[in-house]
Amino acid sequence: MHDKRTPAIRAFEAEQQFQLLVQSVVDYAIYMLDPDGYICNWNEGGRRIKGYDDAEIIGQHFSRFYELVDRDAGEPEYGLRMARENGRYEKEGWRLRKDGSRFWASVVIDPIRVDGQLIGYAKVARDITERHESALRLAEAQQALLQAKKIEAIGKLTLGLSHDFNNLLGVIVNSLDLISAHRDDEKRVTRLVEGALRAADRGMLLTRQLLSFARGQALAPEVRDVNELVLGMKDVLMRSCGLGVDIELSLAQDLPPIRVDPTQLEAALLNLVINSRDSFAEGGTITVATGLADRRPPEIESTARDFVCVCVVDDGSGMSDEVVQQAVQPFFTTKEVGRGSGLGLSQAHGFAAQSGGYLHIASEPGQGTRVTLYFPALED
């Protein structure tokens, strides 16, 4: 059917329809600003959200919707300038209604140009207070959950350390009491002294773990022969394992020196050996080996330099892939209360990383575990 309306009539009707559409929107405040920011027109959504009548707002500067602190900071003028220079301006912030109440608004300002000449701005605002408050509540809940997890972790650490230290002190005190009562039984006194020394070594290890975790003990690296360090620890390692566990050393010859903190390396090695000891149900064999790395984990595979490695291998119960993935996290432990603080592997991992190396774990349930410390070899 042929439309008999003139172009002028069609344009007028289209404009009327557009005005009707804009005025029908009640969830968005849509209004036209002149180039200086004064309000020329707005829709029903503006009246509903802001609370003003037309006579109260038409001809007023749009900055009256802003809080005083934002007006003093030049926020309204800044929004117009950004829209003018960048073609669009978006912002969220507090705005004011007629009754003085605040609401959180999402604001978009677009410049309007005709033949390149700026004739004003289209400003659209939406009340998103409910969404904003929901986001704040979610953030508060997440923070509360994080704090609860921190408290839970501290509680687990405190509980584990309390049991550990109580057990160690109990061993030492009981050994001293029995030594006093059986001074003439040389063999028995020797066993009691060894037990007390093992407990003291364990207490020293726990203290080192705490110092390392809290970063209260800085590294003091020295150029050392790793075989000498391992050989110097043999008695301590054997004492820490007790009866039923064999300690074997497999030391490669002519290894290049490494630069490490010897005290921290000893603590890390003692941690790994004690973890292996605790994996045995009735006893087993722990092998401490040194050598040049031939197979490297992916983390250092692309590095050209050589690495000296120290391995602790056991034939204990082993670990699943899931446990291996979490093993180096602080406070994570599969041991019962009183048998571990969850800091041993974390301390060893952190020490290796600080020394320029890496810690790698290979394990399967029922097949034992191999934990390897990699340290950069010194070329000279």
Image: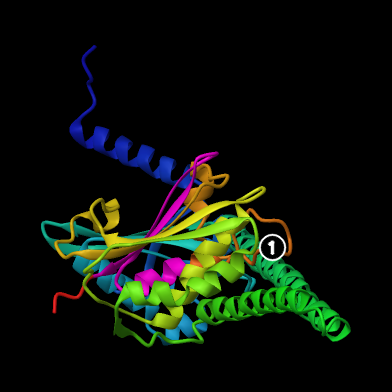
Q: Secondary structure at mark 1?
A: loop
Q: Is residue 310 above or below residue 231?
A: above
Tell me: residue 333, above or below residue 163. Answer: above
Q: Is residue 350 magenta?
A: yes
Residue extending furthest toward the top: 1
The residue identified by callout 1 is 339
Is 127 a magenta residue? no
- Percent x, y for residue 238? 56, 67
Answer yes or no: is residue 71 visible: yes
Q: Quadrant of residue 186?
A: bottom right
Quarter of the image for residue 12 reads: top left
The quarter of the picture where residue 164 lies is bottom right
Left-right relation of 10 to 51: left
Which quadrant of the figure contains the N terminus? top left
Residue 347 visible? The answer is no
**Residue 65 horizontal/vertical position (percent):** 49, 72
Tell me which segment is drawn in magenta. 348-376
Q: Is residue 125 toward the left or the right of residue 275 in the image?
A: left
Mark 1 Cα shell of 10 Å, populated few (<14), some (14-19), many (≥20):
some
Q: Nearer the viewer, residue 99 or 294?
A: 294
Along the line of sight, which residue is nearer the eye, 203 or 228? 228
